[in-house]
Image: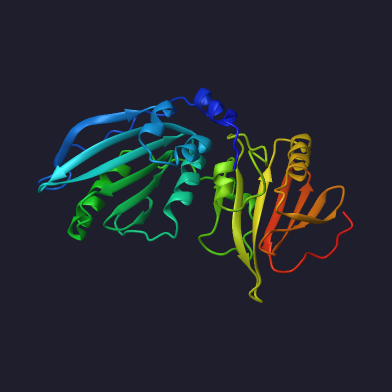
Amino acid sequence: MRIAPFFLLLVLLASSPLAAALEFPADGFFPGWRRSGPLETYAPTALYNVIDGGAELFLEMGFVDLRIQKYSGGGVEIAVEAYRMENAAAALGIYLLKCGRETPLAGIDARNSGDHFQVALLRNDHFIFINNFSGRAELLPVMTALARAVVSAIPPGAAVEELGILPARDMVPGSALLLRGPYSLQAIYTLGDGDILQLEGKRFAASAEYRDPSGAGHALIVAPYEDEAKAAAAFANLRRNLDPYHRVLETGESHFVFKDFQGLFGRAELSGPRIEIRIKLAEQPARSGK
């Protein structure tokens, strides 16, 4: 997939500290454990040197900085990777894309998912990994104590409202995601090359899977824009640059229906200042007069 780098530049230019830096737990957060090595700090331009693939997703979603602190005890090491994002919605977007099916650990006062290998945490504008390099299961209480100490240093923040654009009825639990550009969209579906929905790394779209009482399922992508003109421009770009492996079956002034390479159907519709795209439909949508 060819992706223009312009949105990465936008992120780098727009990124700025939004809150006081996270204060990492001191020595003794758990008996016998202390900091190991200096605190490491990475700006957006250095993220490629830290993440082995995937830096583009963080930058697209709104990455500010990464701070890493390692801790040692009993001859093994655990590391905290704290990714500070532009806002709570950006942090939630990364969390949902990275944690997969959530398996929360008890005793942590923050949204989390993980096991004795790695714990993912979400708190306000921070997305955090706690990594157990040894993989030893008996270190889970240490990781839990470290997680509690880390999140206690971050204010809870306001609720994220960006997922509210999705209808709740028939939504598959745990399937909702936030999108902000081509890399996050790619986790859902390939609509075409580049930033085809023109989210530009600054607008949040949302997606989820749905299943009706009959068992029929599909996925929905909703992309809101500031006004109808921007939505119309994005819709025209989508229609003009739709992936050539999708065959358009029906088109109208504000919608089109297509069939993808897997033989499933999709329907894109412009509705005021938003675009709604239903994909992975087993049957072709009924013909519309729109």
Classify the position of the N terminus by image quarter.
top right
Q: Where is residue 28 in the image (x, y as percent from the top left)?
A: 14, 42
Q: Nearer the viewer, residue 30 or 93?
A: 93
Q: Is residue 202 left or right of residue 278?
A: left
**Residue visible at 76% across and 42% down in the picture:** 235
Q: Which of 239 and 11 is in front in this view?
A: 239
Taking 47 as reference, is 89 above or below it?
below
| Residue 109 visible in image | no
Q: Residue farthest to the bottom?
A: 214
- Displayed quadrant of residue 65: top left
- Displayed quadrant of residue 6: top right
- Displayed quadrant of residue 203: top right
Q: Residue farthest to the top?
A: 13
Q: Residue farthest to the right?
A: 289
**Residue visible at 42% across and 53% down in the picture:** 99
| Residue 202 visible in image | yes
Q: Position of residue 254 (x, y in %)?
A: 83, 48
**Residue visible at 60% across and 32% down in the picture:** 4
Q: Position of residue 180 (x, y in %)?
A: 58, 41
Q: In this view, does 8 lie to the left or right of 104?
A: right
Classify the position of the C terminus by image quarter.
bottom right
Q: Position of residue 23 (x, y in %)?
A: 28, 33
Q: Is residue 172 left or right of residue 69?
A: right
Figure coloring: rainbow
Taking 147 as reference, is 38 above or below it?
above
